[in-house]
Each structure stands twice: as structure tokens, then as C-alpha cells.
Amino acid sequence: MRKFELGKHKPTVGHQVAILSILGFWLFYVIIITLRAAIGDWPAQGEMAIRRMVVTACGVVVTYGLYHLLRLFEDKALSTRIITAFTAAIPCAIIIAFINHYVFNVYYPESLFGEAHIEEMRKYLEQDNFMLKTVSEDATSRFFFIVSWASLYLTLSYAGEVRTVERKAARFAQAAQDAELRSLRYQVNPHFLFNTLNSLSTLVMRSQPEEAEEMILNLSKFYRTSLSGDPLEDVPLSEEVHLQNLYLDIEAVRFPDRLRTAINIPDDLLGVLVPGLILQPLVENAIKHSVAHSKRPVTITISARSEGDDLILTVADDGDPRPVNIDANQPSSGIGLANVRDRLDTRFGRRATLQTVRLEEGGYIAQLTLPLMLDSQ
């Protein structure tokens, strides 16, 4: 059983990505200030570089604390997170500005300015509001620096949320499609079973126990084979044809003198994959409308061919002409052909079609066009 942990929210931005973004921002700061010092030929650049690294390390720690604060608001609205980031950046900038002031102006200034300038520097330090002015100016610039990082973090966080939502939507869409395919696939067996039981009832009423027994055995083989696989899995064309042969064996008990079958499938197409029982409604339709209403032998032909990247499956019969009021070129309102069309549309969209043609001289053709799928195993 799957266990769920309450109160824990998986961050949309990975911890490692957050750390790298913080280090990247502060590394950029160090490089810019160091270049500025070199170009301006500032005194005591070695000592200043050491102190700059101290300020940078403190800045990384403060920014890391801001990162953890923002993580606490990841389940809040984006506007709330933006307000939090801008508000929290103010004390962060002030803290870093105080540290910078202490490191560069208070702690052992003699090593930076030398004896010639130390007295002048002390006069500045002793001025009223010097520290407040220095810290305020530095905090203002560092505020925008911190906000820049926070904006990057919020952007990455929002992008992560969008990807998560898209993945969930894709999973839900796939689950809905799978459920629809299962539903359509399971419609085939009850429909077929209903017709077969009617035929079995007819044999019993006609006192044909041997034929009824043979039909029951064939029915058992058919269901044992058709229910053994996952309804969502494709099957080799050879297996699909085998199932249709089992079904035709069942119907041959009803129509021993009228049902003829022919299979015309090249050997190189026997291994291609097709949706399970996709031919069943087509074969059943031929039995129902051609064999059952004919007084002469009717041949049902199952054939296959490839055209480029498409597989063409055909179920045809040479039955008697159908009544004029039956238009085979229009979508069927029955469960059989409608089921096939729905399954093709759900699975392949416009890449698959079902076309039906009623010939004036007699006969009916149902042609499936679907992507040619090879068995990867």
C-alpha cells in the first residue's frame, strides 16, 4: 500500500539548483567588484579581496536563509510569494550592508588605507550619521541585487510548477484515454457474447446438442484467448486473425453450409501490431448482414496490405445486395462499427480511419487504415 506523508511539500526548484543560483549570483558580484578595483587601481587590493570574500560568504549565507524562507511559501499564490520576496529582501540587504561596513570601515582600517590616510578616514567615521548614510546607500544597491536573485528563483519555481501541472494534465489525459479505450474494448465482448448466446439458444431449441456443445467449446477458447491480455495492449496481427478464426468457427456451427472464410495476409505483416479485437465487430457485421440473410454460401475475406507507413486491413464479403435504405457509406448507428470508429479515433486520432462500401452487385467492404506499428520485441 502506498504511503503518503502529510505536511511535506516537494520543492519545485531543486535544492542543488537553488544553491548554484545563489553561488552564481555572488560569484558574479565578486568578479564585477574585483574588475572595478583592478581598473580603478585601488590600494591594498590583496587585503580588499580577502575582505570582499568575507562579505561574499556572509551574503551567500543570508541569501541561503532567504531561499529557505521562500520555500515556506511555495504553496501560496504567486503574488504572495512576490510580496514576500521583496519584503524579505529589505532586511537581507541591510544585514549585508552592515557586514560590509564593518569589514571595510571598522575592522582594522589601517591595513587598507595606510598611515597617510588613516587619520582622514577616522574623521569620516566620526562624522554624524556616517554609518547610517553608508549602510543606507549600500543597502539600497544590495536590495536590488537580492531582489534580482529572488526574481530568478521565483521564475524557476513558477516554471517548475507549470511543468508539474503539465505533467499531471498529461497523466490525467492519458488515464482518461486509457479508461475510454478499456470501456470501448470491453464493449466488444458483451456484444459478441449476447449474439452468441442467442445463436446457442437457437441450437438448443432446434434440438441440436452436438452443434451447441461445439459452439460452447469454441466460445470457451475464444474468451480464454481474448481475455488473457491487457485491453490496452496491442497484439500481433497473427493473434488477431487467430481470434477471428475462433469466432468464425463458432459461427460455422450456425451456418455450416453458408459460411466460407479466406485469409489473405502476407507473412511479413503477421507480426505488425494492431489493437486487440479491432476486427471483431467487422467480421461480426459481415455475419449478421450477409451470411445470416443469404441462402447461398458467402465468403468472408480478411486481408492486409501495407501502403507506406499505413496498414490497410480489409474485411469483405460477397453476400447478396443489401436493401437500398441501408447506406453502408454512412457511419453505423449500431455498437459494432461505431465502436471501431471510436476506438480508432481515441487511439490514433486522424491517423486512422474506417471506410465501408456497399457494392451494388452485392457484397460489403469494411476497410481499416491505421499506422503501421512494428513489434519492438
Image (spheres, grey):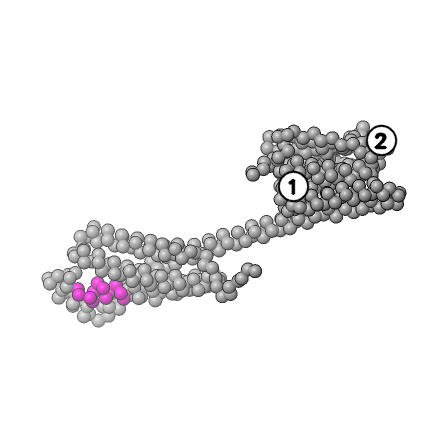
Magenta stretch, main secondary structure, is helix
Answer with left or right where residue 8 lies relative to residue 28: right
Q: Nearer the viewer, residue 309 or 273?
A: 273
Q: In which image quadrant can residue 69 be found?
A: bottom left
Q: Position of residue 311 (x, y in %)?
A: 63, 33
Q: Residue at x 48, y 62 (%)?
A: 9
Q: Distance between the Cα atoms at labels 2 and 1?
A: 33 Å
Q: Position of residue 359 (x, y in %)?
A: 78, 30
> Compared with residue 50, is residue 318 higher up or lower down, i.e. above or below?
above
**In the structure shown, which secondary structural element does the residue marked by tag 2 occupy?**
loop
Quadrant that contains the C terminus: top right
Answer with left or right where residue 363 lies relative to residue 104: right
Q: Residue at x 35, y 57 (%)?
A: 22
Please say whether residue 226 is one of the residues in the magenta stretch.
Answer: no
Q: Amino acid at mark 1?
A: Pro
Q: In which image quadrant can residue 246 be found?
A: top right
Which residue appears farthest toward the right when viewing the image? 206
Query: Residue 296 shows which numbered tag?
Result: 2
Residues in magenta, as a range? 98-109
Q: Residues within 10 Å of mark 2 (few under 14, many from 20)?
A: few
Quadrant that contains the N terminus: bottom right
